[in-house]
Amino acid sequence: MLVLVVLFVSSAITVGKPLTATHVRDSTEPHALGDRCPSNQSLEMVHSRYHGAVHCKCPRGESCVGRKCSVGQYVDGALYHNAIHGFEESCADCKCVQSVSVDTISDFRQSHTLWILGTHHKTGSFLTQRIWGGLHSLVNPPLNVHSSQFRPLDAHRWSNLPQDVDVVVTFQAENINSTITQLTGRPYKFVHMIRDPVRTVVSAYLYETQRADANDRYHRIIVPLSLEEGVLAMAEYMQDDLLKMEDQFKQAAADHNALNVKLEDFTANFDDTIERIYRFLGVPAAEMDKFVASARLQDLSRKKADELSASDHVTRGKYDKEPLISLVETDKRFAKVYKRMKELMGYSDL
């Protein structure tokens, strides 16, 4: 006889302000994949057919505490995961917490867990590098960060990764999955940064146009062309990169040691997003506040206008991107590919 158990967890912890009626959605109302949870914008919402309600979904490895917690969620509208915790979106005192945590960085190092941060061109590489570059000296001894910017880490490089490396940052995230443990002999936690594919292309194009002295592969092709020709040339040139992002997204989605994070989440709520990443990685509670405080220094919404205008890596607020987005998104050569990617990764407006 098959028995399905649904757990409800109680907690006296109260976080945030009570949600108003405007926050509550009818459980039968459709929603797009990737919708944000009203009480925590860094959490995704899913519709649980079993529970008949819309739920805020906890990341893998985290448990819900609060009055309306449950276990078992439909993920991406199809697959039932009985280990996924969540809570009803109307719950005012529910939150996700680490199921297992360590007390100190020394405990983390004894576990020999490898933290991996993976990005793609214009999906938060500069942000990730700056965040972890600032974090490494916050603990004693400092975190040993290995950065691989210009080529992906293949099996040989993973196998030869020094055993004292704590963090790997790669700008070419490819084939990062459970084979990492076989290659390195270590457990791992992997955070994969993604971005709306069309906005990735437009951002890459604008990034190249504001780098007058650059001489990389993108720059040499794009700069001599007109605006329309240039952005469409960038779209064509980046197809391989975007397909690799899509493939890595699928691998991460199927891996309980991996977490896909949208770059856009940092804009929606920087603090919630960086805390979610740190909780998933297992940053010790004693280190959490100073890790978050250090990361906040890279929050664009907290930076002054002159700092943003001086950075080649920042295109936010400098251009009217919408005409370029429309041009790329409606081009017949790429429209079907972008539609598929957006639906898969939670960017679809449908």
Image (cartoon, rainbow, N blue to C red):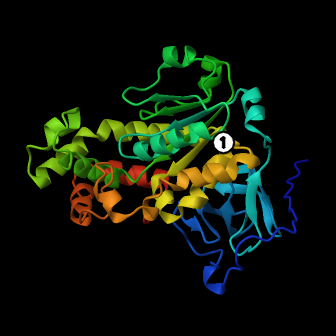
| Type of the residue with mark 1 | Leu
Which residue position is annotated with label 1? 281
Question: Where the C terminus falls, by quadrant?
Answer: bottom left
Number of labels in the image equals: 1
Q: In this image, 274 relative to 112: left or right?
A: left
Q: Nearer the viewer, residue 312 or 322?
A: 312
In what element is the residue under mark 1? helix
Q: Nearer the viewer, residue 92 or 338?
A: 92
Pointer 1: residues within 10 angstroms few (<14), some, or many (20+)?
many
Q: Splitting the image into 4 quarters, where does residue 217 fall?
A: top left
Q: Nearer the viewer, residue 123 or 315?
A: 315
Q: In this image, 274 relative to 152: left or right?
A: right
Residue 305 position within the rendered picture, expressed as x and y whole percent measured from the top left: 34, 64
Residue 274 position within the rendered picture, expressed as x and y whole percent measured from the top left: 58, 53
Q: Is residue 83 visible?
A: no
Q: Residue drawn 50% across and 54% down?
A: 297
Residue 130 position within the rendered picture, expressed as x and y whole percent measured from the top left: 46, 43
Q: Residue furthest right?
A: 1
Q: Is residue 104 visible?
A: yes
Q: Residue drawn 47% across and 20% down?
A: 154
Q: In this image, 114 relative to 1: left or right?
A: left
Residue 286 position within the rendered picture, expressed as x and y whole percent measured from the top left: 75, 48
Q: Splitting the image into 4 quarters, where does residue 257 fall?
A: top right
Q: Nearer the viewer, residue 284 or 185?
A: 284
Q: Residue drawn 71% across and 49% down?
A: 81
Q: Residue drawn 34% across and 50% down?
A: 200
Q: Splitting the image into 4 quarters, where does residue 21 fall?
A: bottom right
